[in-house]
Each structure stands twice: as C-alpha cells, then as structure tokens.
Amino acid sequence: MSNMDIFSSFTSDALQFFDNIERLKASFVGVFGVYACVALAHIILPGSVIDGYACDRHGNTLTYKINGIPVVVLSVLVFHWYAPNKTFFYDNYYHCWFWGNVFGLLGSAVFYYKGRQQPENEIEYGPRSRTKDCPVSSSTPSDKAAFWEQGFFRSFYVGLEFNPRHRFVSTDFDWKMWLYLVGAVMLELVVLSTVAANRRENGGHYSVAAVVGGVMWTWFVFEYIYHEHVHLYTYDIFAERLGFKLIWGCLAWYPFFYSIGLRCLVVPLGETFTDITTTQGCCIVALFLFGWTLTRGANMQKYYFKIAPSEPYFLGCVPQRSIDFTTKQGSRRRILMSGWWGLARHVNYLGEMIQGAAFALPGYLVTSSPQAWLYFLFITSILTPRQHDDDELCRRKYGPMWEEYMRRVPYRIIPWVY
C-alpha cells in the first residue's frame, strides 16, 4: 500500500457507505445506542450538583449535574464487554459519521424551531448570556435589531438559545452538557476502535505510533471530562447559543473528525511503513504534555480567579494580579493579567495548537500522509479568528479596561511573537 493509496482511501471509502444497507442499519443502532446510553447514564448515575457561571434570563445561577467520568468509564466498559466487534467504529466509520450528520441536522432543526417559539420577552438578545458577575442583561437596542435581522441561515447556524434544558427524573438536563459528554464518549470509542484495528492489521501487535496516539487522545477525553466543572466557566457555555455549530459539531465533527489522523496508522508495518521508535514516541508525548500544560494551566488559573478572586496566589506561588474597576451600577470588574494570562491574551489557544501538532506526528512520521495534519489545521484555523471574537466580547464587557489590558499584554496567542 503506497502513501497515495492511504490518502485516496479517505474519499473512496466514504463514497461507498451506502453500498451495504445492513452496515448502515447497524451503524444507526450503534450511534443512536451511544446517544441513548449516555443520556440515560447521565440521568441515573449519581453526581455532584454545582453552580455554574451562566445564569438564566432572570439572573439565577444555573446548576449542573457533574458525573462525566462515571458516564465515560461505564460507556467504555459496556463497549468492551458487549460489543461483538471491537473495531466497529473503525470498520463502519463513514456509516457512523453519516448518522452523526443526520442527527446533527435534525437536532439543529428541532432547537431552531424551539428557539423561534420563545416569547419575545424571554429572548436573550445580547452577545452572551447573563453570568454570575453580570446577572443583568447587557443587550442594547442594536443587539435586538441585529437578532431579528440576522436571517434564517445565521440563526440556524449559531442558534437562538444560550442554555436550553429540560427537567428529567428530578435532573435539570442541560443539552449543551449532554452534547459535550456524548461527543467525548463517541470520540473515545472511535479512538479505541482505531487502535484495535491497528492491532488487527499487525498480527495481534500494537504499533508504538498507535499506542502513542491512542494514549494522547484518551488523555484528551478523560482530562476534559474530569475538568467539566471548569468548563462551566468557558466561552462555549456563556457566549455561544445552541445551534447547528454546536449540535452538529458535537454529534458529527468532534467525535469523527478530531482523531482522523489516527486512521492512517491502520496499515501493516514492514517494507513500506516503519514504526516510530520508543524515543520518538516519548518526545511526541512530551510535546503533547507541554501543550496541555499551557492550556490546562491557563484555564485553571482563570477558573480559580473567578471562583476565589480574593486569593492572592494561584497554586500558592503565582501572584494573581488584575486590573480592577467599579461600574456605574456598583459592580466590580477584574481582568486577570498575571501568570499564563500575562504571557498572551489567549495562551491557552497556543497550547491547543501544540497538542494538535503532537496528535499529527505519529501518523505523519509513519506514513507521511497529509491526512495526519487535518486536525491541527482545523484547530488552528478556528482558534485564530475566535481570538478576535473573544477580544470584541471582552471589549464590550470591560470597555477601556480591556484596552488597558491589551496595552499591558500585547501578544494575542504566541508570547513575544503574535
């Protein structure tokens, strides 16, 4: 098999997904089964109920049930114990991705319709939901006009409601949190299936590259879910509405595209393809952990600054310095400008890009396939413009205070470079 064969199979396999109706049916059952099991496990399994950062339209803090780790562990164990084919999500990859697209479109249509049924006095017109530190609406007449003038396609894409939820079995079922959880579970199952396919292709032995890739992606999933309480304070929760972008993203894009570079490792090692060495694998993991440290360190520092703003140090050693001011309404606003947030305004994005490069290296070093770099290119292309959106939101929230922060921390993503 040549390098060109690997890349061409990326499209040829996709075009044949409808050839086998039985596989299409089995894939529907597999995908829908994961969705249903994750929802049921999230409702039934115990978990801590904590306050989030976002508020409802009345200014009341939203509460969340946190039990992501038990849900992911149970899902993986059920798949390991009961799935007759451990490579199911690899073998039926395009069939499952097809159903992820279908459910993503259907879900987007449902929430678009639901959003249009809101009474006008219940709609949040501003660019972000109400939050603990800003429980009153920040919307302006121009925000209301822009909301109604944005047209069908933009409304469908970005969504109409910030944090829709329903009451199920004494649980406030938050649809955003379920989407992130089911996306993580599906991604992990796809990764495990791909690594199992690598073992099958190599006579019962795992390649070093597949182990390195599988370990990094598994860490990515479990670490994210372990810190789901931290993500209640992130951009996705309080500044993005629930529309096609998030629904399709979590059901189709996140679980099936992110680890696509791992698929090119399902090749027989021998004369054409040579495995990476253990030393190379360790270096790749070290690069990944460096990127993770940037991202997680920055996110954790910001999280603790928000929940305990009076604490003078982060981790007992990093001073928590900030720019402070008081609004006309008497509320205090603070911008963190020390530690990670003194290096660049979005140094956490740099960490995600570095992790993306680490994800690409095992597949690229073994096969030289450009497919290995697709996730890195995606995450870089989405985070670079998102940084501009973040700056605009913060400029609206903090005003001249944000301009002062930009003066003191001039770098956007890469310290001393950009």
Image (tube, rainbow, N blue to C red):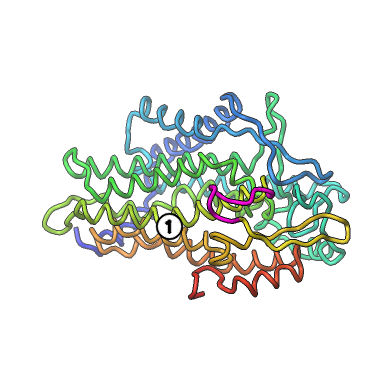
Q: Is residue 53 magenta?
A: no
- The reply, left or right, for residue 324 in relation to residue 262 is right
Q: Eyeballing the image, is 323 above or below 222?
A: below
**Is residue 137 toward the left or the right of residue 334 in the image?**
right
Label 1: state its secondary structure: helix
Q: Nearer the viewer, residue 257 or 343?
A: 343
What crowding class fits label 1: few (fewer than 14 Cα within 10 Å), some (14-19), or many (20 or more)?
Answer: many
Quadrant assignment, res 88: top left
Q: Is residue 31 above or below residue 285?
A: above
Identify the residue position indicated by label 1 in the image: 291
At a point 56% along the width and 41% down the height, the residue shown is 228
The quadrant in which residue 286 appears is bottom left
- In the image, 229 versus 98, the foreground residue is 229
Front residue (pair 349, 17): 349
| Magenta span | 309-319
Front position in the image: 334 or 48: 334
Image spot of residue 119 (x, y percent):
86, 47
